Amino acid sequence: MPIIDPAIEAYAHDRTKPESDILQALAKKTYAERPDAGMLCGRLEGRILQFLCTLTQAKRCIEIGMFTGYSGLSVAEALPDDGELICCDINPETAAFAQSFYDQSPHGKKITVKLAPALETIATLSGPFDLAFIDADKINYQAYYDATLPLMRSGGIIAVDNTLWHGAVLNPQDEDSKCIDDLNRFIENDARVDNVLLPVRDGLHLAMVK
């Protein structure tokens, strides 16, 4: 189920300022080499993440699920020179793909890749963080949210991707869609945050810590 008419999404993409050359190269290589390239967040979502970093004056960020590195590098580009992004993933193949582009970018020095289960990594971290981006296995979305929120500063933002799940949240039947729907409802009722669920791409749920 397409969330947005593809022609409208293409128009929004084309009317949004292009990403950096290295991000365009990363996206091109991902689509050329990976059958799961649809997982790439792309220009619209990458620009939103950059806007969030700029608007919150973010310096410390965490990403749970990095795929081929587009979202992480988008965030890093928006951070100051002394900014820090910790990327959590368990896939050495996609992590190496991402790192190859981080190494080509002057912003790559801001990124630290932690190749381990994200909940193990998060347990070793101290806050505060300004931005968290969650885009990993859907079954653990609630656990990632619960583990990340205590590390966020007041005014910090947790952005959760794929929260409309191709429309499956309207009548969740499988475990992934049920977990996503449960988290959406949990965030809606979480007194610790203000929230908005945006119908951007496959859904982007933003929770701002009070």
Image (cartoon, helix red, strand yellow):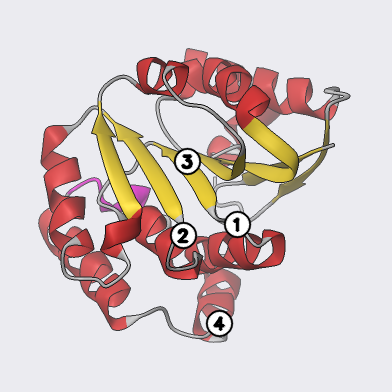
Compare marks 4 and 3 and give the one earlier in the sequence. Answer: 4
Q: CA distance from mark 4 to mark 3?
A: 25 Å
- Residue at x 31% of width, y 71% of height: 23
Q: Residues within 10 Å of mark 1 (few under 14, many from 20)?
A: many
Compare marks 1 and 2 and give the one earlier in the sequence. Answer: 1
Choose top left, top right, bottom left or bottom right for residue 102. bottom left
Quadrant placement of the C terminus: top right
The reply to whether dot 1 and dot 2 touch (C-beta < 8 Å) is yes
Image position of 208 (left or right of 59) = right
- Residue at x 83% of width, y 26% of height: 192
Image position of 57 (left or right of 154) = left
Circle 1 residue: 58
Q: Check residue 182 for magenta coloring.
A: no
Disc 1 marks a residue whose amino acid type is Ala
Circle 3 residue: 62
Disc 4 marks a residue whose amino acid type is Thr
Compare marks 3 and 2 and give the one earlier in the sequence. Answer: 3
| Closer to viewer: mark 1 or mark 4 | 1
Mark 4 lies on a secondary structure that is loop
Disc 2 marks a residue whose amino acid type is Val
Q: CA distance from mark 2 to mark 4?
A: 17 Å
The reply to whether dot 1 and dot 3 touch (C-beta < 8 Å) is no
Compare marks 2 and 4 and give the one earlier in the sequence. Answer: 4
- Compared with residue 10, is residue 210 higher up or lower down, i.e. above or below? above
Quadrant placement of the N terminus: top right
The reply to whether dot 4 and dot 3 touch (C-beta < 8 Å) is no
Circle 2 residue: 75
Q: Is residue 155 visible?
A: yes
Q: Which residues are magenta?
A: 35-40
- Residue 32 drawn at (x, y percent): 14, 64
Circle 4 residue: 16
Q: Residues within 10 Å of mark 3 (few under 14, many from 20)?
A: many
